[in-house]
Amino acid sequence: MQQKYLIAGLGNPGPRYANTRHNLGFLAADALADSLGAAFRKKNGFSLLAEATCAGNELVIAKPQLFMNRSGEAIGQLVRYLNIEPERLLVVVDDADLPLGRIRLRKQGSAGGHNGLKSVIDHLGSREFPRLRLGMGRPADAEGMINHVLSDFSREERVIVKEIVQRAVETIHCFLQYGIDQAMNSCNTL
């Protein structure tokens, strides 16, 4: 039976932030759309959207066009508009608590200090939605977190970023085809 899924990659809009650590969610959303032959064309409220079919399911890929700490406004609007159940929403986000190159898929959980996830939780009124966390690493000094998340990746890091974005796409395909449990088993063992 065909179902509709919403995959939301979080990031910051605009060319200034395009290649920053905080935009790993956008990079994964772009790569997912490319893998399915879809393009971001539609704008619905606060999000750019691409539509595709994957594993027999309808898929909407979203890139909220509000800054990270307000991205929940866009996700909440889309969830209501598309009538998406929480288990069919997957939020893709950067994670400073994971080293660069690691990814983790979870069924639900807290914001873990991430303002984008906090905004989504606030606007959905629930923590019970899957999230795919893409590791970007933590700066050496806690004071430098803002500069860290808004900095571009180095040339060496871009090789790793390309790999984790590809693994994120493979994980999302697995999630859509086989469900969250099998996708977690596959993703979280690497």
Image: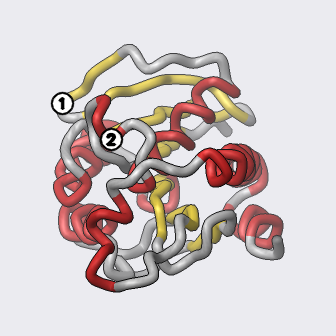
Disc 2 marks a residue whose amino acid type is: Tyr
For disc 1, the marked residue is 45
Q: Quadrant of residue 181?
A: bottom right
Marks 2 and 1, the one that precedes in the sequence: 2
Looking at the image, which residue is at 53% across and 72% down?
A: 137
Rounded to the nearest angstrom, the CA distance separating label 2 from label 1 is 21 Å
* Nearer the observer, 30 or 5: 30
Q: Position of residue 163 (x, y in %)?
A: 74, 49
Q: Is residue 85 visible?
A: yes
Q: Quadrant of residue 132?
A: bottom right
Q: Position of residue 144 (x, y in %)?
A: 30, 74
Q: Are marks 2 and 1 in contact (CB under 8 Å)?
A: no
* Nearer the observer, 85 or 90: 90
Q: Residues within 10 Å of mark 2 (few under 14, many from 20)?
A: some
> From what the image shows, is residue 5 above or below residue 107?
above
Task: Look at the image and name its color scheme.
Answer: secondary structure
Q: Is residue 109 left or right of residue 15?
A: right
Disc 1 marks a residue whose amino acid type is: Gly
Dot 2: what SS? helix
Q: Residues within 10 Å of mark 1 (few under 14, many from 20)?
A: some
> From what the image shows, is residue 115 above or below residue 152?
below
Q: Position of residue 102 (x, y in %)?
A: 68, 68
For disc 2, the marked residue is 17
> From what the image shows, is residue 72 above or below residue 97?
above
Q: Position of residue 95 (x, y in %)?
A: 48, 69
